[in-house]
Image (spheres, helix red, strand yellow):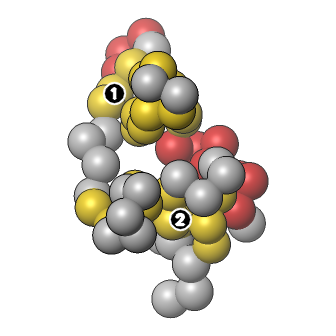
Amino acid sequence: MESKITANGKFEVFPDGRILRIKPDGSREVPAILRTGRNRKYCMVTYCENRKQKHVYVHRLVAAAF
């Protein structure tokens, strides 16, 4: 499957919804997916930027990529 890089090069997103975090050294890892919101229906991943933790919703990453 073809993938796209999103969030300023922080994540690699696949059309089926899989997410990989791109580390500063270029390696990739599967991030921990947190469930948030009422009834825990929104999935979220985190990354660090300027020594601060940032949160991004998975559905927004997929929408931005495709």
Instruction: Let me know if residue 52 appears in the view.
Output: yes
Instruction: Let me know if residue 20 appears in the view.
Output: no
* Front residue (pair 35, 3): 3
Q: Which of the numbered marks, if any, corresponds to residue 13? A: 2
For the residues labelled 1 and 2, the Cα–Cα distance comes to: 18 Å
* Front residue (pair 39, 45): 45
In this rendering, the answer to whether 1 lies above or below 31 is: below
* Front residue (pair 51, 62): 51
Q: Residues within 10 Å of mark 2 (few under 14, many from 20)?
A: many
Q: Residues within 10 Å of mark 1 (few under 14, many from 20)?
A: some
**Residue mark closest to the camera, 1 vs 2:** 2
Q: Which element carries disc 2, helix, strand or loop?
A: strand
Percent of width and height locating residue 24: 42, 56
Percent of width and height locating residue 49: 52, 32
Q: Quadrant of residue 4?
A: bottom right
Q: Which element carries disc 1, helix, strand or loop?
A: strand
Q: Quadrant of residue 33?
A: top left
User: Label 1 belongs to which residue?
Assistant: 35
Q: Amino acid at mark 1?
A: Arg
Quadrant of the rendering where the C terminus is positioned: bottom right
At 44% across and 24% down in the image, what residue appears? 51
At 40% across and 69% down in the image, what residue appears? 26
Percent of width and height locating residue 12: 51, 65
At 53% across and 65% down in the image, what residue appears? 13
The answer to which of marks 1 and 2 sits earlier in the sequence is 2
Q: Residue furthest bottom?
A: 1
Q: Amino acid at mark 2?
A: Val
